[in-house]
Amino acid sequence: MKEILLIITQFTLASLVCCLADRAISGQALWTNRSYCFNCGHPLAWYDMIPLLSAPMLKFRCRNCSQTFTSVPEWLFFEGLFPLMMLTIPFQWSPAYFLHFFLLFLAREDSQKERAHTDIVWLLTPYFLFFNEGLAHDEPVFILLKVFFLTLNFPLMYLQKMGVGDFPVFVLAAIMFDGVAFTNFIFTSTFSTLIFVPLMIKKRKMPFLPFLLFSWIITELI
Ligand SMILES: [Zn+2]
């Protein structure tokens, strides 16, 4: 029974966070009474908001105006893969655990509009810098490696090969993960991005934050 409740909670939380991210990045109020289509304003019925199930039943389109509200890869990742991966991480009342949902929020924003409120990450970094032991256990060579990688981001951002919004997430990863885990994180995010490039060809720009979130959880599982 506890397991079923946990499964339902994870899928519902993922769906709720995605809904809030969609509203935030569209400039809508985060908390309103009813969910509605951003295109035509049509209010959603309860059966249009069932986590994981409603989107495919609606063929990923608004019931009223037929505007697409999500894609199959997005649905698979945000409403399927993310809650499934979260089920493999033991639940705990800790900022590091709930950080996953904040990263989900940012990843969803990036996926929807190719930008995200990642400035908020800067507000979190002092907390994790002081209360996380990832850096404390690092050997000097790994600290140098992290500094080198983060410095490498600047020319990439200047050349617009990497979004400015991805940088704070890399800084947070450098704080949260020890040297070996951070190296895993970089490799996983790079390779997962390369694998999924063919799925993103319709988009003008590749949203990178979903891959960082995926790699974040994979790194923790390793
Ligand atoms: Zn609509």
Image: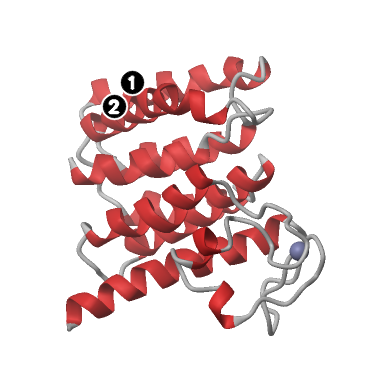
Quadrant where the N terminus is found in the figure: bottom left
Q: Position of residue 19 (x, y in %)?
A: 59, 65
The residue at label 1 has a CB less than 8 Å from ligand 1 = no
Residue 60, above or below 29: above
Q: Name the element at disc 2.
A: helix
For image coordinates 25% across by 30% down, the residue present is 179
On the image, which quarter does residue 53 sit in? bottom left
Colour treatment of the image: secondary structure
Instruction: Tell which residue pokes out farthest to the right in this image.
Output: 40
Q: Is residue 111 left or right of residue 169?
A: right
Taking the image as four quarters, which one is ligand 1 found in? Answer: bottom right
Task: Return the mark for residue 145.
Answer: 1
C-alpha separation, residue under disc 2 versus residue under disc 1: 9 Å
Q: Amino acid at mark 2?
A: Thr
The reply to whether residue 23 is in sight is: yes
Label 1: few (<14), some or many (≥20) within 10 Å? some
Looking at this view, is 187 or 108 the one in front? 108
Q: Position of residue 25 (x, y in %)?
A: 70, 55
For image coordinates 21% across by 30% down, the residue present is 180
The reply to whether residue 134 is in sight is: no
Q: Earlier in the sequence, mark 2 or mark 1?
A: 1
Label 2: few (<14), some or many (≥20) within 10 Å? some
Q: Position of residue 32 (x, y in %)?
A: 70, 80
For image coordinates 33% across by 20% down, the residue present is 145
Residue 104, above or below 44: above
Q: Amino acid at mark 1?
A: Leu
Contact check, label 2 and label 1, Cβ < 8 Å:
yes
Q: Is residue 106 left or right of residue 114?
A: left
For image coordinates 43% across by 70% down, the residue present is 13
Task: Return the mark for residue 183.
Answer: 2
